[in-house]
């Protein structure tokens, strides 16, 4: 069961981040040149691969197991609670809903004023926008997948989830050549926030010597508690906004 | 500068309350743990969960007011 939950958490987190990165690369490709968009994205993927090599095997393997669990727990809590906070505010109508389309339009707007160089010359503006977009989303992917992959039972579930998500999003992007506008991104991000926060509490507690009742199944009731609290807050905030 | 700012936001989020809250919860857990090892082993997870829920609630309410 933990295998499925970790794969699911990694898969959805990677999908959401990749969709945002893809939206920026597609914006550069459509409004400028596909070759420059691909080159910018490829350099960012290379930088993220180097980061994954450093964060993954080198740093994580040299830290004692319990300390590592606490570190992973805190890292997942930092990401998860931030996603959950934003998700709660979005569900309550206190923040704009998440949309890769807006990232797409924002990237096109950034390039609007930069003149396109003649064919044969590098389009540095396009390459930099694609590079920066992929790099920032990629760093988040590397940190989340590395944290989930550093579990004592091995990296397989996180890597399987991330790989499936990567293939699915890239295939959809190549096929549609436009941002995936029909996806409920706000709800997906909220779900990732709940899962990452639940894993964060679970690992941090295990690293501090806690024995969870029910073993790995504890992730389910931790996630249910966090999800319920977030939904209650979202409803309360939405209700009070209507009254105001 | 904007890239550094984005990286800071990426790691610590948009509000300092969240990393400070997580640091407080973790420090409190480390202080409580040696007081009663048996209690901590069995119920420490729930204590941590309550702390995390409180951090989430505080961060949501604080940023909803802005």
Image (cartoon, helix red, strand yellow):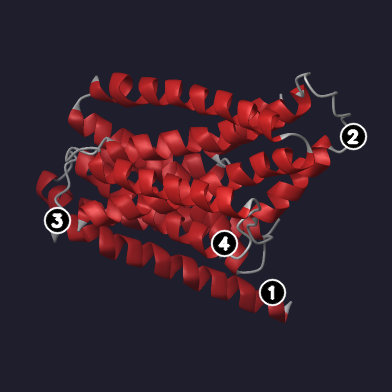
Q: Find residue A7 and report its horizontal and vertical position in percent.
A: 31, 51
Instruction: Specify few, some or many for label 3: CA neighbours under 10 Å numbering under 14, 14-19, or 20 or more.
Output: few
Identify the mark nearer the N-term, 1 or 2: 2
Q: Which residue is mark 4?
A: A186
Specify the label residue A113 is tagged with. 2
Identify the mark nearer the N-term, 4 or 3: 4
* Mark-to-mark CA distance, 2 and 4: 31 Å
Q: For the residue labelled by badge 4, is the local secondary structure a helix, a strand or a loop?
A: helix
Contact? badges 2 and 3 (CB < 8 Å): no
Nearer the camera: disc 1 or disc 4: 4
Q: Which residue is mark 3?
A: A215
Identify the mark nearer the N-term, 1 or 4: 4
Identify the mark nearer the N-term, 2 or 3: 2
Instruction: Specify few, some or many for label 4: CA neighbours under 10 Å numbering under 14, 14-19, or 20 or more.
Output: some
Taking the image as shown, residue A243 lies to the left or right of residue A87, namely right
* Mark-to-mark CA distance, 4 and 3: 31 Å
Q: Find residue A114 and report its horizontal and vertical position in percent.
A: 87, 30
Identify the mark nearer the N-term, 3 or 1: 3
Q: Which residue is mark 1?
A: A241
* Mark-to-mark CA distance, 3 and 1: 40 Å
Chain hosting mark 3: A
**Mark 1 vs mark 2: same chain?**
yes
């Amino acid at each position: 069961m933990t295998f499925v939950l970790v794969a699911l958490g990694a898969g959805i987190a990677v999908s959401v981040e990749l969709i945002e990165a893809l939206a920026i690369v597609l914006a550069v490709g459509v409004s400028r040149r596909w070759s420059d968009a691909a080159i910018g994205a490829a350099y960012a993927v290379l930088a993220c691969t180097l980061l994954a090599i450093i964060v993954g095997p080198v740093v994580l393997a040299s830290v004692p197991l319990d300390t590592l669990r606490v570190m992973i727990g805190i890292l997942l809590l930092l990401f998860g609670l931030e996603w959950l906070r934003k998700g709660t505010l979005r569900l309550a109508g206190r923040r704009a809903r998440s949309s890769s389309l807006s990232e797409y339009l924002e990237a096109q707007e950034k390039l609007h004023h930069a003149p396109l160089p003649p064919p044969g010359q590098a389009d540095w503006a396009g390459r930099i926008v694609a590079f920066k977009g992929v790099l920032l989303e990629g760093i988040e992917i590397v940190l989340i997948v590395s944290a989930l992959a550093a579990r004592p039972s091995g990296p397989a579930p996180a890597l399987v989830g991330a790989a499936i998500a990567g293939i699915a999003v890239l295939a959809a992007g190549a096929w549609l050549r436009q941002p995936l506008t029909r996806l409920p991104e706000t709800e997906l991000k909220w779900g990732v926030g709940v899962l990452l926060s639940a894993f964060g509490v679970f690992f941090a507690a295990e690293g501090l010597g806690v024995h969870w009742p029910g073993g790995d199944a504890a992730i389910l009731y931790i996630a249910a508690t966090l999800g319920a609290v977030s939904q209650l807050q979202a409803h309360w905030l939405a209700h009070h906004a209507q009254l105001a | 500068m904007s890239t550094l700012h984005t990286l800071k936001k990426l790691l610590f989020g948009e509000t300092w309350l969240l990393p400070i809250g997580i640091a407080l919860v973790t420090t409190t857990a480390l202080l409580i743990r040696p007081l009663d090892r048996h209690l901590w082993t069995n119920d420490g997870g729930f204590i941590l969960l309550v702390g995390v829920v409180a951090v989430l609630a505080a961060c949501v309410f604080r940023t909803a007011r802005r």
